[in-house]
DNA sequence: CTGAAAGCGCTAACAG
DNA sequence: CTGTTAGCGCTTTCAG
């Protein structure tokens, strides 16, 4: 692979001249420039990003941590992050945290090893404390879909509680009282937040929360199916179901179809959704939309601002940090007559 | 960020000693090692992967080109590639080719800029010729799910034609004669291969291909829905449908549900599937399985073998390169009585 | 406008 | 067993 030196000798100039021309710094005689450009073309020369990184002490890389690449959700996130990074000509380094704090730590270590200029963390297992102490280090990072006290200026967040509440209130407004809920895994903060919203909505409408109407899932499709099954087994009557994510709702819908339970005649459905699964199901499901795409873009913008600010505060930039839920009503909620 | 020099001075030894200890080369006095380890720990030192790359002339990175991160399919691929790369402690660089040869070229350029040791290409828009000429360059690469004449030793391929044929033969074996087909976008080679399999199966059974029973989709969900719609509008009777991918089948299923067309009583269904969508639908759909995960792993293994071989042939390694289709029969194909 | 020289953080002979 | 030296490919003063 040709190096800058090869180009220089072929063009009959010094390496530093080539370097300047590549980087568009300074000004040159037209024929010098031409000679160099010809040499570069002839040798099919491309500067080594790595050598450049070392010389400039800036890697031009940014990291993104997700839990898993699979499942559609993270693809949306990654796609947006990449697009946004492309605009600044930065390289994207991705890593999976799998399902543990250790996995996430390991991912961050890799970002450091590569001297990433910053990273976006969709962290689920690192504690608030650990994240706060990480903030003491010089490398900037942004938390995507998380809010940790003290780190608000690095957080792109979404009000999961309010979103869930909105969904359930919609059900209530349509006359439903016995509303079942499939929650996410108990340990996860987003699960808790959504569940809280469910309960808040009920309570504020004076409906007593029936714990037997709440089944814990794990955000996977199958757990939605099983949840509905157990709901029917416990023979607690319900007219509506709220699912804390779309995958579980998919499983639930499968159960309903299999058992010839009509949507929305026999059961009304509303779900969290981020990747648009709800709109591609039959019938099209009502949802509260979780705008992960927009949030991902905002995260990168915030990160770039932080990198540019080099440790100083970034108050001047206007980037939306707290995203709001949006209710999309479709055909899966029936109005109950009193 | 601490450098190897800082560690060295703190430990009171030379940089090269530190380097050796990090890389486990040579042997040292116990207390030297301890001093160095303490210094590293104290400074929270991590060697710079970039500087290392430059010094060793090997970046420790591998590239992966996909068309888009979104959609689930590529997530599966990426996940496997990352896992496999992790085992060799290599960094993964991903890039999206979007939907053009230029996009793919640009992606490869980035791999070169970073001096990736090799890359896996899920290329759809680069011509065979261009790929062959790329093979003249020193950087090894592997083609995932593609077969280009002359580059067989770099190809991890799947027999799409045979897979489609298998699916359609299954339908025929169950007594179906009027078999509709939703194809992929006409320009794509995998589409053509699958369509060919469909036609072969019919022809070999002496069934005349009815072009009005074949509708072109674009591998997206909505196009499956639309395809079925147009199929019914053209009022060509059919008892079975074969879809060239799972996303389009999803759209089709939605149409059937919406129009109360029972599966499999009124229509039998079989689809291509790679990410397992078919098994999570109601009813569980019969499919020919496209083992993209296994293929992705094989691609990385082959790439690593090529990298290790440094330009020499890699005949000794036993890596499956041509994957075979597998028919998974579930509940969506009804046997027609004669 | 361009060359010379030093240096980024690390590794790799080569001595000793 | 460990220090010296040179160099990876590029950028960046500093001269001229």
Image (cartoon, coloured by chain):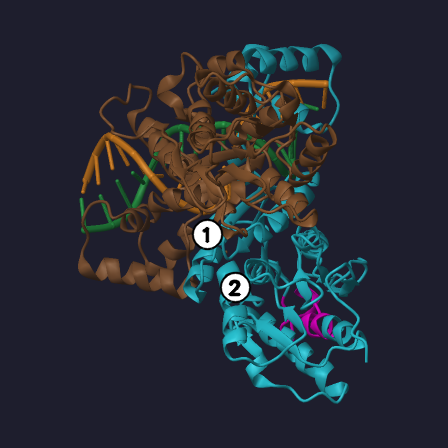
Chain colours: A brown, B cyan, C green, D orange
| For residue B68, side relative to residue A34 (left or right) | right
Q: Residue B136 at what x, y percent from top left?
A: 57, 68
Residue at the extreme front of the image, as rendered: A338
Label 2, label 1: how many angstroms apart (C-alpha)?
A: 38 Å
Q: Residue B225's mark?
A: 2
Task: Report if residue B59 is visible in the image.
Answer: no
Tell me where the magenta segment starts and ends, as one range.
Answer: B146-165
Q: Residues within 10 Å of mark 1 (few under 14, many from 20)?
A: some
Q: Nearer the viewer, residue A177 or B243?
A: A177
The subunit carrying tag 1 is B
Q: Please tell me in which quadrant of the rendered image residue A62 appears.
A: top left
Q: Are marks 2 and 1 in contact (CB under 8 Å)?
A: no
The subunit carrying tag 2 is B
User: Residue at (33%, 20%) from the top-left corner?
Assistant: A311
| For residue D5, side relative to residue A310 (left or right) | right
Q: Is residue B91 magenta?
A: no
Q: Mark 2 or 1 closer to N-term?
A: 1
Q: Residue B231 at what x, y percent from top left?
A: 54, 75
Q: Which residue is mark 1?
A: B110
Q: Residue A131 at what x, y percent from top left?
A: 50, 17
Q: Residues within 10 Å of mark 2 (few under 14, many from 20)?
A: many
User: Residue at (34%, 46%) from the top-left corner?
Assistant: A87
Q: Nearer the viewer, residue A150 or A235?
A: A235
User: Is residue B246 shown above or below D3?
Assistant: below
Task: Report if residue A46 is visible in the image.
Answer: yes
| For residue C6, side relative to residue B171 (left or right) | left
Q: Residue B253 at what x, y percent from top left?
A: 60, 60
């Amino acid at each position: 692979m040709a190096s800058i030196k090869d180009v220089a000798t072929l063009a009959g100039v010094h390496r530093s001249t080539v370097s300047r021309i590549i980087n568009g710094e300074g000004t040159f005689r037209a024929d010098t420039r031409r000679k160099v450009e010809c040499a570069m073309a002839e040798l099919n020369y491309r500067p080594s990003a790595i050598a450049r990184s070392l010389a400039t002490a800036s890697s031009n890389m940014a990291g993104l941590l997700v839990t898993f690449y699979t499942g559609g959700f993270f693809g949306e996130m990654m796609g947006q992050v990449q697009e946004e990074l492309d605009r600044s000509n930065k390289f994207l380094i991705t890593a999976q945290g799998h399902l543990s704090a250790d996995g996430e730590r390991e991912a961050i270590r890799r970002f450091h090893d590569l001297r990433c200029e910053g990273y976006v963390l969709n962290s689920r297992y690192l504690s608030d404390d650990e994240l706060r102490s990480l903030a003491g280090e010089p490398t900037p990072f942004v938390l995507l879909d998380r809010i940790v006290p003290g780190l608000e200026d690095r957080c792109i967040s979404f009000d999961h509680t309010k979103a869930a509440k909105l969904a359930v209130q919609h059900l209530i407004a349509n006359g439903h009282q016995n509303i079942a809920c499939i929650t996410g895994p108990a340990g996860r903060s987003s699960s808790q937040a959504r569940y809280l919203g469910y309960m808040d909505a009920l309570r504020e409408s004076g409906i007593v929360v029936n714990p037997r109407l709440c089944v814990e899932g794990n955000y996977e499709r199958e757990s939605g199916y099983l949840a509905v099954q157990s709901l029917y087994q416990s023979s607690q009557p319900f007219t509506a179901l709220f699912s804390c994510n779309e995958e579980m709702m998919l499983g639930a819908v499968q159960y309903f179809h299999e058992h010839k339970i009509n949507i929305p005649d026999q059961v009304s459905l509303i779900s969290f959704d981020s990747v648009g699964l709800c709109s591609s199901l039959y019938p099209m499901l009502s949802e509260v939309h979780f705008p992960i795409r927009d949030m991902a873009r905002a995260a990168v913008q915030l990160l770039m601002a932080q990198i540019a600010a080099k440790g100083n505060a970034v108050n001047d930039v206007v980037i939306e940090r707290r995203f709001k839920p949006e209710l999309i009503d479709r055909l899966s909620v029936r109005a109950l007559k009193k």
